[in-house]
Amino acid sequence: MQATIWHNPRCSKSREALAILHEAGAEVEVVEYLKTPPSAGELARLLDRAGLSAGQVLRTSEPGAKALRGADDATVLAAMVADPILIERPLVETEKGVRLGRPPEAVREIL
């Protein structure tokens, strides 16, 4: 099975999700999204596959998120592309779908 994880190695939840993928025997492409952020189109595609809005994957604990309270999804998406730290992590994609790994066990749904 192939899987892609948009990963932040400093995040414990992201590391846990990556471990679940490895334990399941997945061939994992690791994308450190802070170094290689997704384009607006790619992020929109991922969110669509996950059935999530941009607001649902906004990392609200980040200082830059406060200014986005009440913003529409297009504005939030543009802000996340400009400053990828605003993207909640990890996002995991397999042929079965996309899940936000919060909690990390959620990625099991697409294995």
Image (spheres, rainbow, N blue to C red):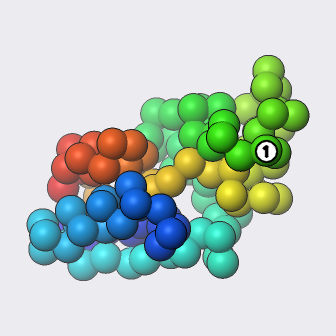
- Residue at 12% of width from left, 66% of height from top? 24
Q: Is residue 93 left or right of residue 79?
A: left
Q: Position of residue 6 (x, y in %)?
A: 49, 65
Q: Is residue 76 left or right of residue 97?
A: right
- Residue at 30% of width from left, 61% of height from top? 16
Which residue is situated farthest in the left direction here? 24
Which amino acid, by three-letter code, is at mark 1? Pro
Q: Position of residue 65 (x, y in %)?
A: 77, 39
Look at the picture and state if 108 lies above or below 27. above
- Residue at 20% of width from left, 73% of height from top? 22
Look at the picture and state if 68 lies above or below 26. above
Quadrant of image for the N terminus? bottom left
Look at the picture and state if 58 lies above or below 93. above
Q: Is residue 9 left or right of residue 1?
A: right
- Residue at 31% of width from left, 59% of height from top? 17
Which residue is situated farthest in the top direction here? 70
Which of the pair 16/83 is nearer the observer? 16
**Residues packed near mark 1 inside 10 Å, few (<14), some (14 to 19) or many (20 plus):** few
Give the quadrant of residue 19.
bottom left
Residue annotated with mark 1: 63
Q: Position of residue 3 (x, y in %)?
A: 31, 68
Q: Position of residue 13 (x, y in %)?
A: 38, 55
Judging from the image, what secondary structure is the residue with disc 1 in?
helix
Q: How many marks?
A: 1
Residue 46 in view: yes
Which of the pair 2/59 is nearer the observer? 59
Residue 92 in view: no
Q: Is residue 99 left or right of residue 24?
A: right
